[in-house]
Image (tube, rainbow, N blue to C red):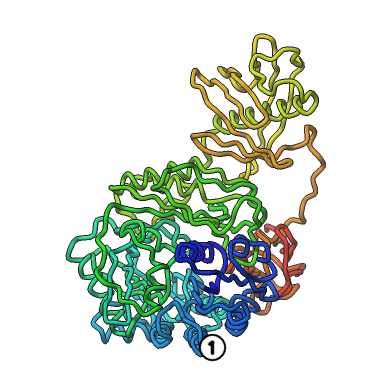
Amino acid sequence: MLVANRGEIACRVFRTCRELGMATVAVHSDADSTARHVREADAAVALPGSAVSETYLRGDLVVKAALAAGADAVHPGYGFLSESAAFARAVLDAGLVWVGPPPSAIEAMASKTRAKELMAAAGVPLLAPLDPAAIRAADLPVLVKAAAGGGGRGMRIIRALPELEAALASARAEALAAFGDGEVFVEPYVEGGRHVEVQVLADAHGSVWALGTRDCSLQRRHQKVIEEAPAPLLPEELRSGLLSAAVSAARAVGYVGAGTVEFLVGRDGRPAFLEMNTRLQVEHPVTECVYGVDLVALQVRVAEGFPLGEAPSPSGHAVSARLYAEDPAREFAPQSGVVRCLSVGDGGTRVRVDAGVESGDAVSVHYDPMLAKVIAWAPTRDEAARRLAHALEHARVHGLVTNRELLVRSLRHPEFLAGKMDTGFFDRHLDALTAKGDGKAVRLAALAAALADAAARRTARSPAVPRHIGGWRNLPSQPQVKRYRAEPDGEETEVRYRLARSGLVTESHDGVRLLSADPDRVVLEADGVRRAFDVAAYGSLIHVDTPGGSHAFTALPRFPEPRTHAVPGSLLAPMPGVVARLADGLAVGEAVRAGQPLVWLEAMKMEHRVVSPAAGTLTALHAVPGRQVEVGALLAVVTEEPTP
């Protein structure tokens, strides 16, 4: 079996293949030559290049790779070529088994505009598209959406008519770059709606399973973050209606294999068809946990021509969270670099981790920044959410800024726990969910980092001396000073302490007693409460993990170094990426507005706007479309207009 994909989904399909006794083949770009999915496959074939368009989107090269490796079947995973009818046909024409729906079904659902026409004919409820030229203020808000693809790319919410024309152009450009198809359409935007979907599975013998509902309402940039099954608080009439509509949708296109029918449920409880994803979804594990099935194994069984048989029954509740290398406090800016450690705490057999990277792997600028999905199952929804939050809170994720804290706080938010969330959840609560934590907790973690560093230095000087240094002797009595910068917010903390015969003496941590200190673990008693701190140092980057949360610091020199400053008005790249495009007509000497988008960077499959920091004149332009830039690279300079 060749998996025409990468990362987490390739690893996940390989796992089932091993259980089925099937040999596996990976394909990889140059950037992925040492990636986890390559290491886990029995064989691997290189697709020269790093850009997606040169590698994972080259169906001809993928088919050649399958034939060269002696594979007899191709699984597309999700994304990339998974919803390409042309690729499915090429696989079949090469005499290979296609582990997916018929090309005709993919084609029927490939265009969301065409899919809506088919669903209307099948009696599936939907939102009618709007003519962009006829949209008036009374029609707002509306949603601009790419006709092909998904994942939030090519999607814009419009709340003011003057924004529509620019949004259409921007969405077309992003959709064309992501999917090779710039068609977009406009439909009413449902405020406060819930994203509810139905997992379907059909065989070639006329059976169609509807494996319950999933709620995927917690989204950022129209991309799902937390999903669960079954969708909570659905009236039985609505639930059964969604299942029936999903089966009708599958039958309308002669569907075979695994697919997902997505709906938007308004505040009034009325559902509307969004799209049908003719592939396995990222969030499929919650359905697997609730129904006790392996959807990949069932895909293979259907592809081999076997009937499905009797549908399984659901049990319990499952919640899944996507762990991303991104900074939620900075507009979810994607991160790249080395994952120093990725270890999700032991949640028992009821916590599952589907990961595409391991400790030591690199997160590339070329692809989606998802590190892993963490899924928890329990008899009840409350228990599943609590178990997942606990597993994430106790995870060790070192080396990159992630959304882990956002996930934990979201899972414990009263609105989520009540099951009353909608797609506007992060719009309403993001500031609170990304607010800085307890300052005292940060200072204690920094103290632990300093004490662990002292223990490591002592061990390096005298390796024969026991590492445990509670009740130290021959201790330095002079004050010790360490400076740290908390990551990613940049706030600096200074630790001053002295180790006297009477114990730990600090200037800024009253009521703290040192119980023990090793290079990797420090135990303190603060205000009568014993707390353990696990410390890991990677050069100047230090991670401190505690049961109540995790902290990352950069160790700073004792005496601040002179700093260089960018020219006022500089536009710096907020992340590594490729300059996708510039604002129309942008040139040195042009007048620009404050907040005007000037440069678009493409990073990790998304476009990110870089806007003018002030009204003024563009006095320098260094950004060139197609050029790779590193984080902090100077893109342009805007000289601010003098205040009259």
Q: Amino acid at mark 1?
A: Ala
Left or right of 311? Residue 9 is right
Residue 547 visible in the displayed image: yes
List x then y, in percent, for residue 399: 64, 48
| Residue 512, image quadrant | top right
Q: How many marks?
A: 1
Q: Quadrant of the C terminus?
A: bottom right
Residue denoted by label 1: 94
Point out residue 108 in the picture as x, y percentages from the top left corner.
39, 86
Q: Nearer the viewer, residue 410 or 191?
A: 410
For disc 1, the neighbor class at 10 Å (few under 14, some 14 to 19, many from 20) is few
Can you say whether 205 is above or below 419 in the image?
A: below
Residue lying at the far top in this picture: please name it. 502
Instruction: Name, please, the residue furthest toward the bottom.
Output: 93
Task: Give the residue displayed 42% in from the left and 56% down from the top.
Answer: 226
Q: Give me the residue at 42% from left, 83% from top.
A: 106
397 in relation to 204, above or below: above
Question: In the displayed structure, does residue 533 sit left or right of residue 287?
Answer: right
Residue 428 rendering spot, x and y as whole percentages: 41, 53
Residue lying at 35% horizontally and 50% vertically, measured from the top left? 377
In this view, the residue in front, 360 or 643, is 360
Position of 262 with respect to 511 (left or right) is left
- Identify whether 50 is placed above or below 290: below
Coordinates of residue 407 in the picture (x, y in percent): 46, 49
Could you say which quadrant of the image residue 134 lies in? bottom left
| Camera sees residue 609 | no
Q: Secondary structure at mark 1?
A: loop
Nearer the observer, 311 or 194: 311
Q: Residue at x 74, y 41 (%)?
A: 539
